[in-house]
Structure formats: structure tokens, C-alpha cells
Image: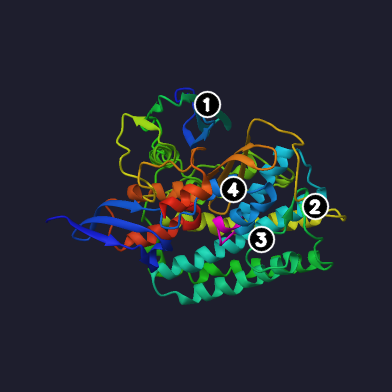
């Protein structure tokens, strides 16, 4: 049969943003996929060189609009290391709690849209969004806004958490654990979901390392690697948690890893809440900063919901001289041709869904 | 490096210092859980570097990005196909000689 070339996107509901794919198909079999990116390019790395340190969080937040706090925290953490600002202890615990809530919210949105990509299953979509809204409400009450928080300051937060923060966080943990444990009733028990994820888009352990993927995609292929353990920041080294891994590296394993990560995150939040000391969590209200300490470069790694995010920063007096962002979704997308090759055309969108892509972060 | 167990390439990036460009490779060893940073300096007159795609498949998109953003020639592979496809291939936006406000408007 002759090979047909199909253009998909850049506006397509299955691509979760502006992704253009040029797909060569032989009948229903995918022979080659070529992703075209860059439709959402703003030149964030260049822009950040022109702004002062504390003006930049608004850019880092928009890198990932599903989990803005994670990127924001990675940037602030890098600046704190560059300038030598210590983080207050209550703030460290509060950051861990909020980051883990953010991770659960991000995974919930992913799960909802992923099952939607596969077809039917609108129940799970509504469940995920219902539970995510509860997390966003708590984050809104802590920070003051629902999506783009910009509540991190050097050394802490812009304000202390509300007085009933701990009780509400505990109650939310109980609620989420109960609800999340119910998801497999509509997912794992559903034959459509299982047929379309088991054995689809298999990435072997060797390839996962060679292609440099990270996060749930890497762990789904059986590599036990998590920046929270290998490069601990804040109080993650004081908290014990498991790193869930898959065995086959297919879409189902990637779903399973994220699902178990949500439960682990709840454990981390409970642990951090129990150990969180009382006290002031307010950071500095400084807009102009001189060179307090000036190292050659800073490499900051954090485990974002999508994988390992790295900021390579060369600090200067008032502004960063150069900021390089390692976006986990960028390199997870680069592996798509490998995953989709030889599979069915319909599975292409299920594979894109399982990678959890954010194009604001890929195109930068 | 590859032989000594550094099997994971986290990122390739570059910094422009006007008279030279530093290319930085962030490597990671998955078994020993160790990091390594490899830094090479390229003179402004001769911006060429060998490809590492045979050692790390992850280098594919990073090298295309380097070539597009800094105008570094990657020896041993074709990087004519741009990654972000935004710039015309003759301007290198992440170089310091590219002034943000002025040059951006000119390209519009």
C-alpha cells in the first residue's frame, strides 16, 4: 500500500494545545511522526534576562498554566540559592504542602482530559474536575488568586496562611484520598480504558534513559528516579515516601504511576502538616536586590508534575545574565515519534495524552 | 563520560559572553545517582561543535535548539530544519548582540 501523509493540527482537540504533526500512515499503521512546535514561542528565556529577579515569577508561572506554583517555586528556589537567602522553616513546610497539592491538582486535570481523549468516560472527567476545584479553592484562600498565585517571596510567602489552614488541609487530604481511591472503579474496571492503554505506546527502560525523558514517563518505564529524592530540596529529605514505578512502560503504566503519585503526595502532605512548626512564614518584600552572593552559576532541580525541571542560571547584579529552562514536557514530546511508530493512528492521540504535554512550557 | 556510566543527558544549553560562547552539558548517572556538568568554550570566530547524538538520543532537539537560538554549527548532522520555526534562520535571538526591544520589532 502507498504511504499517505496526513497533517494534524496545529489546532486539534487531541493535541492539548498548538502542536502540528505530520504523520505518514500506511493504511492504519503509523510509519513516521514529525512534531512541529513553536507556535506558542514567546522567548521567555530572553525576556527574563531583561527583567529584575522579582519581576520574573509572572513569566515562570505562565510556563505551565496547569501547575503554575511548581515552576514559580523552582525559579524562586534558584534565586534564593543565587543570592544566599535562607528559607524560613514554617515556609519550607508550607511550600512542600502547597507543591504537593499542586501536583495532585495537575495530575487530576491530566487524568480527566486523558480519559476524555480515549473516548466516553465523561464520568471520570467530571470527578477529576470536581476534586481539582477543591484544591484550587484552598490554594486560592492561601494565596489570593485561583490560578496564577505569585505568592512566593524570597525566604517565604507574601503572607501567612489562614488560621484554619491546617484543619482545612487535613480535611482536604481525607476527602481526596477517599475520592481518588474510587477512580479505578470507573477506569481499571472499564474495558475501553484498558484496551486503549495496555500495551499502547511502549517505551523500554533503555530507550527511556537514552531519550532523556523524565517524570512519570521515565518512572512508568521502570526507572526509579525522582528529583525529590536524588536532589532533595526544602524538607523532602525528612519525609519518607515511595517512588511508584511501572514495569512495561505503556500508557497504562504512566497512568498508574501518576495515580499512585497522587496517593503518595497525600501522605507527604499529612507528614509535613504534622511536623510543620508554627511561626512566621513571610518572606522579604524587596524589589531591588544588590549582589549579596554571586556564584558563577546555579543549577536548580525540582520534580515538577511533568518531570524534572532544571533552571541553569548565571546571576548578575539586578537581573539574571542568562536563564536556561529545562522543560520536562519538551523532551517528553521528543520521544513521541518513537512511541507512535508502528502503532495505530487512533492510538497516536492516546499516546500524546499519556505524555501530559503543556505547550507554553515546550515552546517557551 | 559515556563509558563511566553517565547515561542520561538532562540538558544542553549555552551562554553567550560576547567574545565566546560556552556550551554546557548536564549529565546524570542513573545507577550511581551522580551529576556532572561538562562545559566547553567556543570562540566567536569558530562556532562549531561535534554532535553527541550517537551517545545520547536526547541530544536531538537540544542541538537543533542550539543551532537555531545561538547559530552554533553542529558538525555531523543536518540542523537546517529549524525546531521552533519562528526565526528566519539568520538571526540568533539568544545571543547578546540581539537586543530584545529593537531587534524584535524589526522582525515583526
Q: Are marks 3 and 4 in contact (CB under 8 Å)?
A: no
Count neighbours of disc 4 (C-alpha within 10 A) and say few if under 14, some if 14 to 19, many if 20 or more.
Answer: many
Indicate the secondary structure of the residue bearing disc 3.
helix
User: Which of pointers 2 and 3 lies earlier in the amino acid sequence?
Assistant: 3
Q: Residue at x 80, y 52 (%)?
A: A283
* Tag 2 and tag 3 share a subunit: yes
Indicate the secondary structure of the residue bearing disc 1.
strand
Q: Residue at x 27, y 60 (%)?
A: A7
Q: Is residue A56 visible?
A: yes
Q: Provide the residue designation for mark 4.
A: A48
Relative placement, left or right, of B26 versus B63 is right
Label 4 marks which chain's residue?
Answer: A
Q: Where is residue A140 drawn, in percent x and y?
A: 70, 68
Count neighbours of disc 1 (C-alpha within 10 A) and say few if under 14, some if 14 to 19, many if 20 or more.
Answer: some
Count neighbours of disc 3 (C-alpha within 10 A) and say few if under 14, some if 14 to 19, many if 20 or more.
Answer: many
- Circle number at residue B39: 1
CA gap between label 1 and label 2 equals 35 Å
Q: Is residue A215 visible?
A: no
**Quadrant of the rendered image containing residue A298:** top right
Q: Residue at x 45, y 57 (%)?
A: A40
Residue A62 drawn in magenta: yes
- Circle number at residue A101: 3
Amino acid at each position: 500500500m502507498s504511504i499517505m501523509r496526513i497533517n494534524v493540527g496545529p489546532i486539534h482537540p487531541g493535541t492539548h494545545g498548538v502542536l502540528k504533526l505530520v504523520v505518514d500512515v500506511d493504511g492504519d499503521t503509523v510509519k513516521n511522526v514529525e512534531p512541529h512546535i513553536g507556535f506558542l514561542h514567546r522567548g521567555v528565556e530572553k525576556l527574563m534576562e531583561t527583567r529584575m529577579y522579582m519581576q520574573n515569577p509572572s513569566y515562570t508561572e505562565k510556563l505551565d498554566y496547569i501547575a503554575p506554583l511548581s515552576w514559580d517555586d523552582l525559579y524562586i528556589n534558584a534565586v534564593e540559592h543565587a543570592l544566599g537567602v535562607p528559607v524560613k522553616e514554617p515556609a519550607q513546610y508550607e511550600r512542600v504542602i502547597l507543591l504537593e497539592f499542586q501536583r495532585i491538582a495537575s495530575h487530576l486535570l491530566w487524568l480527566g482530559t486523558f480519559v476524555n481523549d480515549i473516548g466516553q468516560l465523561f464520568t471520570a472527567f467530571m470527578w477529576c474536575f470536581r476534586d481539582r476545584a477543591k484544591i484550587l479553592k484552598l490554594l486560592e484562600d492561601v494565596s489570593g488568586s485561583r490560578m496564577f498565585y505569585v505568592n512566593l517571596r524570597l525566604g517565604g510567602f507574601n503572607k501567612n496562611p489562614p488560621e484554619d489552614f491546617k484543619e482545612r488541609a487535613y480535611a482536604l487530604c481525607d476527602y481526596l484520598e477517599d475520592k481518588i481511591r474510587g477512580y479505578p472503579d470507573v477506569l481499571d474496571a472499564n474495558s475501553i480504558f484498558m484496551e486503549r492503554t495496555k500495551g499502547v505506546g511502549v517505551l523500554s527502560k533503555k530507550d527511556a534513559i537514552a531519550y532523556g525523558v523524565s517524570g512519570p514517563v521515565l518512572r512508568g518505564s521502570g526507572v526509579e528516579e525522582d528529583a525529590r529524592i536524588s536532589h532533595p530540596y526544602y524538607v523532602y529529605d525528612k519525609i519518607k515516601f515511595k517512588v511508584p514505578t511501572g514495569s512495561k512502560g505503556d500508557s497504562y503504566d504512566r497512568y498508574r504511576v501518576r495515580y499512585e503519585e497522587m496517593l503518595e503526595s497525600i501522605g507527604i502532605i499529612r507528614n509535613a502538616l504534622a511536623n510543620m512548626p508554627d511561626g512566621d512564614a513571610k518572606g522579604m518584600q524587596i524589589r531591588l536586590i544588590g549582589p549579596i552572593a554571586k556564584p558563577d552559576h546555579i543549577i536548580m532541580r525540582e520534580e515538577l508534575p511533568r518531570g524534572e525541571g532544571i533552571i541553569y542560571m548565571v546571576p548578575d547584579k539586578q537581573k539574571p545574565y542568562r536563564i536556561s529552562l529545562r522543560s520536562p514536557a519538551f523532551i517528553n514530546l521528543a520521544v513521541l515519534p518513537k512511541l507512535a511508530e508502528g502503532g495505530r493512528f487512533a492510538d497516536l492521540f492516546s499516546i500524546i495524552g499519556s505524555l501530559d504535554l503543556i505547550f507554553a512550557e515546550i515552546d517557551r | 563520560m559515556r563509558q563511566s556510566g553517565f547515561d542520561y543527558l538532562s540538558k544542553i544549553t549555552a551562554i553567550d559572553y560576547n567574545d565566546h560562547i560556552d556550551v554546557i552539558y548536564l549529565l546524570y548517572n542513573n545507577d550511581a545517582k551522580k551529576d556532572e556538568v561538562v562545559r566547553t568554550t567556543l570562540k566567536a570566530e569558530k562556532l562549531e561543535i561535534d554532535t553527541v547524538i550517537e551517545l545520547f538520543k536526547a541530544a536531538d532537539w537540544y542541538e537543533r535548539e542550539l543551532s537555531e537560538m545561538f547559530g552554533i554549527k553542529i558538525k555531523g548532522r543536518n540542523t537546517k530544519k529549524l525546531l521552533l520555526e519562528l526565526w528566519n534562520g539568520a538571526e540568533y535571538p539568544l545571543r547578546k548582540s540581539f537586543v530584545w526591544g529593537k531587534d524584535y520589532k524589526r522582525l515583526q
